Image (cartoon, coloured by chain):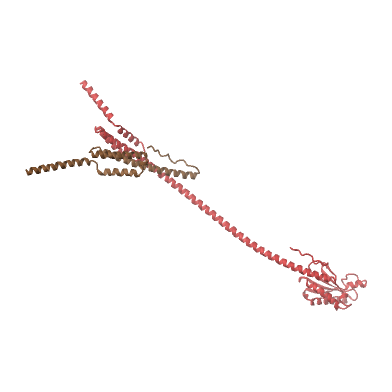
Chain colours: A brown, B red
Amino acid sequence: MAGAMHWRHCMKNLILGALLLLAGCVTVQVAPERWGRLDQTIQQAEQLGAAQVPMAALHLKMAREQDLTARQLAANGDYRSDLILARAQADATLAVALAHEASIRRSMEQTDAQLRELQGQGQGQPAAPTQNQPGGSR
Amino acid sequence: MKTATKVFVAAAALSLSGCYTMMPRELSDARAAYNRALQSPAKAQAPSDLYDARRLLENSERAMNAGEDIAVVRDYAYLALRKVELAESHARTQADWDEIIKARRALDTLQAKETKAAQQKAADAQAALNAAKERLDREVAERDAAMAASKESQQKAQEQADAARAQMEQTQAALNDLNEKLSALQKVAPVKQEERGMVITLSGSVLFASGRATLFPAAMLRLDQVAQALKTMPESTHITVEGHTDDVGTAEFNQQLSLSRAQVVRDYIVGKGIAPTRIEAYGFGSTRPLVDNSNPENRANNRRVEIVIHGAPPVSLNGATPPIPTN
């Protein structure tokens, strides 16, 4: 009788453990460092002034939205949470790149203007641009 | 069988059509973007991003071909598109960087050139300033020297003018004195200006007894006046006392008598203060008569003593003092 009780108790623990393990597997589909990396990338985009660059701001917004979606999916154990997180990360990374690109573009325009001004002073008249203006295709 | 074949073909066509329509727009857009990026600088500037994009496109296509959830196909296509866009952004950024570096090099070159030009300009300006300063210093020194020389010259000229004026005043005073004396002298003896000098003629009968060389007392008074006049003459003047007789008696006697009388007069005048080196006595006997000795009056005129003053200043013998030139 005691043996049967012990066996049933063990089975209960085993089943509980298995359930807990399954629950853990569902919530640990996405590695925690990936959420951290996404947060850092979003923060970096903000610091680079992505909000002031229209396309960068758009991708930053999409990154945030997909971040929320990925978290909800992860919480629900949806297997797509991984891909949605990857999409959020891709948008955040692109926002950083676009913000950085805009910053470099401004520096280039300033340097180019400075050069043209100096050339104009040297020739006594405004100088022609040294290159085509940045496309700004985005 | 024929019907079965038709059904199979139709099913296959429907299946293919289904597959074709199953390719999501995200995948076709990502593929087009990827192909476009391969033709752009992104291929060279961001090859790793494009490599990732290609892998993601393959994932998307694989998922689609495997009949996986269309959402997964879209997700991979989405990620591929983002990678392509990232590659393009990186390429543009790199191009901008290259342009910045190029512009900065040009800027550095221009600035270096401008700096050099400015330094050269400053050096030229400094050199011009130094040259101007040297020229100014030299001109100031020359002006100062000229002013000093002019001042010295003016001072010397002033001193000379003062000395000349003083001498002129002294001479004028002496002349005035001389004229006064001569005016007084003319009352006792005729004075005339001849080519040889100023001649004071004293009658022999007034000075000496006949045939003798001793002065009368009255003659001494006249000779005092003559001596006073002679003392006013400049030291440079030379005086000769010449004795003359008439033709009575022998020539030797007359010669001796005229010389003796001249010497007596000379000695008297020397005794009155005239330097002996300035005055000499000569006897001419009857050799230089003023008029012929045909009657007693003429002979009296020929008996005489003449005092000749050589180098005397011009004086007015009518009592007026002639002006001395101021220059």
Q: Position of residue A105 (x, y in %)?
A: 39, 42
Name the residue at 48% across, 50% down. B116
Quadrant position of residue B213: bottom right
**Image quadrant in which you'd find residue A50:** top left
Q: Residue furthest right?
A: B295
Q: Is residue B218 above or below residue A100?
A: below
Name the quarter where the C terminus of chain B is drawn.
bottom right
Q: Between residue B217 and residue A27, name the one nearer to us.
A: A27
Q: Name the residue furthest top.
A: B2
Position in image of residue A108 (x %, y %): 41, 43
Identify whether B193 is placed above or below B112: below
From the top left corner, tell me how far across and down residue B137 is, in percent.
Answer: 57, 58
Left or right relative to B142: residue B73: left
Q: Is residue A134 left or right of residue B174?
A: left
Left or right: where does residue B105 sit relative to residue B11?
right
User: Which is more toward the observer, B148 or B78?
Assistant: B78
Can you name the residue that lies furthest to the left here?
A1
Q: Is residue A17 left or right of residue B26?
A: left
Pick the front one: B288 or B296: B296
